[in-house]
Structures are given as C-alpha cells and as structure tokens.
Amino acid sequence: MSFTPLTEQLIEALQVLPGVGSRSAERMALQLLERDRTGAESLTRALRSALDGVRQCERCRALSESELCTLCSDDDRDHSLICVVETPQDREAIELSGGFRGDYFILQGHLSPIDGIGPEELGIPQLIDRVRDGGIQEVVLATNATMEGEATAHYLIEQLGPLGTAVSRLAQGVSRGELGRVDSGTLSHALTDRKQVSFEHD
Amino acid sequence: MSFTPLTEQLIEALQVLPGVGSRSAERMALQLLERDRTGAESLTRALRSALDGVRQCERCRALSESELCTLCSDDDRDHSLICVVETPQDREAIELSGGFRGDYFILQGHLSPIDGIGPEELGIPQLIDRVRDGGIQEVVLATNATMEGEATAHYLIEQLGPLGTAVSRLAQGVSRGELGRVDSGTLSHALTDRKQVSFEHD
Ligand SMILES: [Zn+2]
Ligand SMILES: [Zn+2]
C-alpha cells in the first residue's frame, strides 16, 4: 500500500507497541485516520496525560502519580523490609498471596548484558543507597528462578553482602520459573519460609 | 493488576486499536510507561501530526495531506471515469492491475444498517453530487462480491440510474469475494470487460 508521509510516520511509530509489526500497524493507522478519529483523539490525549503525569515512585520504581506510590506511603506497612521483584506483576502476585507486608523494589527487568541492561538500568545503585542509609532489617530477593533472575539475585547478594543487612531468598517451591505462575498459597509459604543467605559461603 | 488512574485511562484508550483487548492494552501501556518513554513520545507526536495533517481527499475520500490526493490531482488520468471501491486496499489492487486510469471514489466501507453505516457515512451524496455536476462519462462499480458489497452496488445503481451517466460493473471472475484476493491479470480483465448496467431491468 502507498500512504501519505504522515500516515507512514504513524505506521512506523505504532511499531513501538509490543507485538505490533508493520501489517498490524498499517491496519491500526487506517482505522484511526479513516474510521475512528474520536478514538484517535482520546488515545493521543491519554498518551500525553500519562507521559506527563505518570512517573516512577522514587523509592520502589513502581509507576506512580506522586513522589511515593500508594504502597511506599502506606504507614501500615513495615518499611524496614524490602522485597526485590523483577516486575509490577510479580509485586501484584506477592500482594495477592498476602504473605508480605513490607516495601518492594521493582527492578523492571533483570540483568541482561546482551540487551544493554546492567545494574544502572535496573536501579540497583538506588537500592544499595537505600540499604546503606540504614533502617532496613532485611532484603528479600524474589527475582524469578530463571537463568537471568538467578544471575540478578547473585549480583544483588554480592552488592548487599558487605552492608551487613540480612538478605534472604524465597524458599523452594517457587524456584521453578516465574513468580506470576505460582499459586498464592505456595507463594505465601515461600515468603514465610524464606532462607537467609549466608555470606560466608557465597 | 492495579494501575494508577492515568495508566488506567491509557489502557482504556489503547483499546480503540483494532485487535487490542484489555490484556494487550495493559502490556502496551506498561511497555510505553516503564520501558520505552522515547517510543511513547514519538507515538504521541506521530498521532498528533497525523490527526492534524491527514484528512480525506475532497474528491475521492482517500487519505491525503492536501485538498486533493495525488491520484485526483494527476493530469495524466482520465477524470471522466470514476471507479467506486470499498477500501483504499481495493484501489491499490486495481492500481497494481494497471487496468484502470481514471479516478476513484473510496466508500471506506459498505452499507451496513446494523452498524449504523448508511449512505451518508459512505459519502454517497458527495459522489451523486459529483456525477450530477457533469463531466463524468462512466461510473464503474467495483464493490466486493459479498452480500454487503452487492447491496451497496444496488443502492448506487438506483441512485445513479436517473442521472443518465453510464454505470458499469466488473466482469465475472472477480465476482467471488474480495477484490484484494484476486490476481492482477484477472482484475485487469474484469475491468476491461466491464458490463454496462441496463437501467430498464433494474
Ligand atoms: Zn513505591
Ligand atoms: Zn482523491
């Protein structure tokens, strides 16, 4: 198909969306410009508002519309515990399990040197600073039991070890894949039975 | 998952895209806000520019960045012939077949009362006006050979008949489904061998 230059630009830009290739992007652009201008206007406004109003929580990196997210500013939670997860979905799974009432730190991914994702991209220096500032009794590592999740946990153990704060990992049972795939009961137990990492042997 | 209000709005707005349900919209919103702000900015800008700069050609309803699209303003084409198609994809198929060198009129759909799509939505009054204004020798109906395409063609025949301009339809061979599925050779022949509609029998 031949398109006008601005339509071509839109087709190109739509491909930043996950799972959208050139064919779907063409279909989307035509739908928006030919048949649903009202929807296209709402989408443009929603994108603008979200980009301007949604940022990362300064403490845990969750999406938030204020400096601290709802969980980080909740006085009923134990702010001396930090559970480190890869994604907001993992945080959600742990919240639903009811097994944890502390803070979270969301890496928004895992170490993946091949994709240019190192400690900086995951906010790890920020997590180290927070632990170093004191007031943290324990860091619970709840990265996925995948190769990348394990590598990320090992890196965190190396970095946190010298600081003297307790570091623990989820108990067996959720050690086979992704947190979101584990049922709430198992996840809750894995949190309760978490094992402290011994730095002598690492 | 729980999301911030502006993230919820974005998830809702993304569902105007064809084939995007609530799960894909969630994945898209998180991708844009957590991992690809640069892409999200480009997408927002591309949407804004396309909505402001792309409109319908005043003659044929194709997407265009000026009053008349490239085809309608091409002096080498025969502006006394109008081929009526359902979609820009159909126009593209006919262009690729090389069997037609006149103007087009793109309905951007077909009659579908159940979806609230009547003659107005397809720009039919605009087409009738253009024929009534004179200078048109023939209108070639190239709607799809589907039930809706046929109903649309019959409606057009009823409206165009009294105006005295020749009206024709594609020859057999492309009468089994959608234009875009027919090979170029067959389509080119169907255009050359088009049959004039006799108004006495309609
Ligand atoms: Zn937070
Ligand atoms: Zn045009």
Image (cartoon, coloured by chain):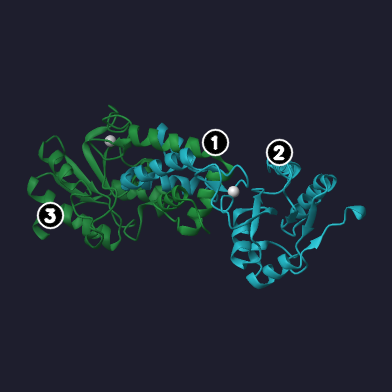
Chain colours: A cyan, B green
Cα distance in 3D space between marks 1 and 2: 18 Å
Seen in the picture, residue B39 relative to B189 is either above or below; the reply is above
Which kind of residue does numbered mark 3 sit on? Glu
Tell me the residue at 56%/54% (across/down): A74
The secondary structure type at the circle numbered 3 is helix
Give residue A191's position: percent from left, percent from top: 71, 65
Chain at tag 3? B
Q: Nearer the viewer, mark 1 or mark 2?
A: 2
The secondary structure type at the circle numbered 1 is helix
Q: Which residue is mark 2?
A: A120
Mark 1 neighbour class, 10 Å CA radius: few under 14, some 14 to 19, many 20 or more: few
Q: Nearer the viewer, residue B151 or A146?
A: A146
Residue at the extreme bottom of the image, as rendered:
A185
Chain at tag 1? B
Cα distance in 3D space between marks 3 and 2: 69 Å
Give residue B60's position: percent from left, percent from top: 25, 39
Tell me the residue at 22%/34% (across/down): B79
Q: Nearer the viewer, mark 3 or mark 1?
A: 1
Which kind of residue does numbered mark 2 sit on? Glu
Q: Nearer the viewer, mark 3 or mark 2?
A: 2
Q: Which residue is mark 3?
A: B158
Mark 3 neighbour class, 10 Å CA radius: few under 14, some 14 to 19, many 20 or more: few
Seen in the picture, residue A82 relative to B134 is either above or below; the reply is below
Q: Nearer the viewer, residue B100 or B31?
A: B31
Tell me the number on the disc at residue B38.
Answer: 1
Precedes in sequence: disc 3 or disc 1:
1
